[in-house]
């Protein structure tokens, strides 16, 4: 009776393939965040500007323009360290 070796390299347990797949998914997620558009209404932008006014006129003016989520993360990190 012949015995067959069931352990083969094509069974999907290759760690390099898994790591590459995770890196590709992470890259796509970051790219999606950077490409998102700002969907705030004019009144929401104005409200954000008024709420930020005590921190300075320049920061309040920044709230009136388009802001991607990536820009918000960078700005919030910068504000937290200052």
Image (tube, rainbow, N blue to C red):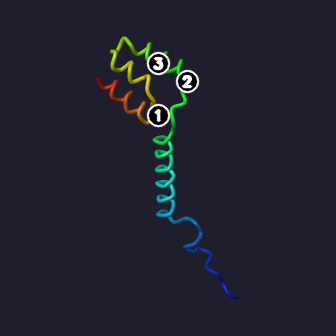
Please, is residue 14 above or below residue 66 in the view? below
Give the number of the disc on residue 51: none
Residue 26, percent from left and from top: 48, 49
Task: Name the mark nearer the viewer: 2 or 3.
Answer: 2
Label 2 and label 3: CA atoms lie apart by 11 Å
Can you identify the residue that label 3 sits on? 48
Residue 35, percent from left and from top: 48, 42
Residue 67, percent from left and from top: 45, 31
**Closer-to-camera residue (63/72):** 63
The residue sitting at the left extreme is: 82
Please, is residue 16 above or below residue 35 in the view? below
Label 2 and label 1: CA atoms lie apart by 15 Å
Label 1 and label 3: CA atoms lie apart by 15 Å
The image quarter in which residue 2 lies: bottom right
Q: Of callouts 2 and 3, which one flags the residue occurring earlier in the amino acid sequence?
A: 2
Density class for disc 3 (Cα within 10 Å; few <14, some 14-19, many ≥20) is some
């Amino acid at each position: 009776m012949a015995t067959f070796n069931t352990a083969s390299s094509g069974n999907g347990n290759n760690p390099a393939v898994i790591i590459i797949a995770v890196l590709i998914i992470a890259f796509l997620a970051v790219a999606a965040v950077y490409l998102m558009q700002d969907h705030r209404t004019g009144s929401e932008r104005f409200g954000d500007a008024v709420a930020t006014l005590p921190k300075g006129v320049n920061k309040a003016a920044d709230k009136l323009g388009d802001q991607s989520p990536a820009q918000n993360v960078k700005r919030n990190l910068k504000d937290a360290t200052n």
